[in-house]
Amino acid sequence: MSTERSAGRREARMRKGRRRFAAAFAVVVGVLVMAVAAGSVVSLTQGPRVSSVVVDPQAAAESSGSRVILTANQALGEVSQDQVEVTPAAPFTVDAAGREIGVRFTAPLDDDTEYRISVPGVRAVGGGPASTLETDFSTPPATVFLLERTEGDDEIYRTGLDGADRETVFASPEIDDFRSAGGLIVASVRNPDGSASLIRMNDDGSAAEEFALPGDGTIRNLQLSERGGRIGYTYTDLPASPGEAPEREAQLFTASLRAPGDAPSAVAVAGEVPSVDTWQFVPDSSAVLLIDFTGELVIVEPGSDAEPGVLGSAVDIDAVARGTYTAIVERLEDGMVWIDLATGDEEPLVAPDPEPGLLGNVLPLPSATGETGGVDSVRQYTVLGEDGVPTAQQVTFVTADGAAREVVTIDMPDALLQTCLSPSARYVAATVAGDLASNPYDTMSLPMPAQVDTLVYDIDSGEQVAALPGFGVSWCAAGP
């Protein structure tokens, strides 16, 4: 009898437990249904929201092509470029798919600046109310590398524009030149026998490694192509004996930036390796633009079977504009001209009226349009007195339509040796030798006056923002 009562009680407890489980399960399901319903209501009433953002502010301030990716909490309907707003204004393109909106900046951004990206009128792929997706980010203050030659070891150092927190990243008894890109530095140093060594290191000076070179010789015109992952330089053999001509003179070589131990490659034109007067990498491509010792302007794809493009004769290459596949070169008879490197078409450089003096170097500002003559530029002029004698050198900002504005004037006897633009063209750096008559040059392969400084100016205001000892600021594509 007791056994039957015990079994009954167990069965009752089990039925009660099942009822409790069912009730709890129903409560959980109800909560989930309510949560989903609430989420759907919020989604239907608020529209899409930003769930994550990917941005690299330092890369955005140092090079073109950086992207900011906004990811929404749901798939988005069509988003056009006209919907996207960037403040302060900067050139950009937009690609959107699924939950992501990608904003690609076609020119570097200003340093030490807060940017906002706003995308109003965004709807979910299935419709519903519109919302605004937005994000803010700040670019860091600019830092630069410079080379300072001293009575002791020469130094490559890093600093902010305020000159604070100077840090020596590489020192050697005689440093000829250096270039930096992509977190790496390549330095050309002179050995006791007069030959050059080429050393690659991280931009904090660590992990130094020597490049293989064509032989025992000297190096000039060192340049880097960050996008192409290459270095380039002109190489000349040391003479076998005093007074003897070198076997190879000013031949252009390129090598892998990431593999210093690989043998360098001579740049050939129509099957022959010419002596090169001046040259530049073509940005965003693997091509090289050069002027050989005969004065012929040639564009060539190193390592390719493609025929070189012969673009007539030229005296100098001032710049190869980023993103446009065009160059500013100086013709002997026509002066400064724009050349389309793909077609060979050219047009004269727009001249300001009146011109401040004799035109020297021309640096195009980054262009979002890909146009040639329609690009603003920073130009270097030699100012002449009434008697025709030079009295000063002037850095001038010239708009695409020829309107000119002085940025800075360097009065004689000081000498302006080089001008370079910061990545976004917010600043211009002027390499200045004080009192050149009493400031003798050294005897390096890249000779420089004993006292030289880099002065940095804001292009819009003309205000001097930095005065730093040394030359070869890392904004320059090549040394002075």
Image: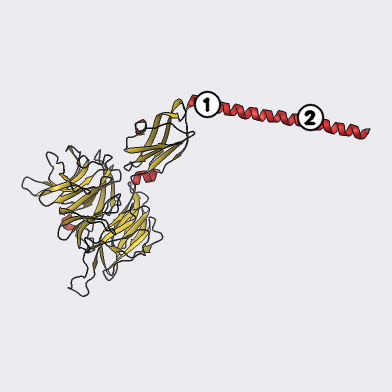
Q: Judge by depth and name the residue closer to the eye, 275 or 448.
A: 275
Q: Judge by depth and name the residue closer to the eye, 381 or 15.
A: 15
N-term mark: 2 or 1: 2
> Is 294 positioned to the left or the right of 466 in the image?
left
- State which quadrant residue 365 falls in: top left
Would you call the spot at circle 2 few (<14 residues within 10 Å), some (14-19), or many (20 or more)? few
Counting from the top left corner in percent of width and height, residue 468 is at: 29, 50
Q: Is any part of residue 427 visible from this angle?
A: yes
User: Which residue has dot 1 on it?
Assistant: 42
Q: Judge by depth and name the residue closer to the eye, 287 or 465.
A: 287
Q: Residue at x 34, y 62 (%)?
A: 199
- Check the picture and name the quadrant holding the C terminus: bottom left
**Dots 2, 1 in contact, CB < 8 A:** no
Q: Is residue 265 above or below residue 92?
A: below
Three-letter code, disc 1: Val
Counting from the top left corner in percent of width and height, residue 188 is at: 30, 62
User: Which residue has dot 2 on it?
Assistant: 16
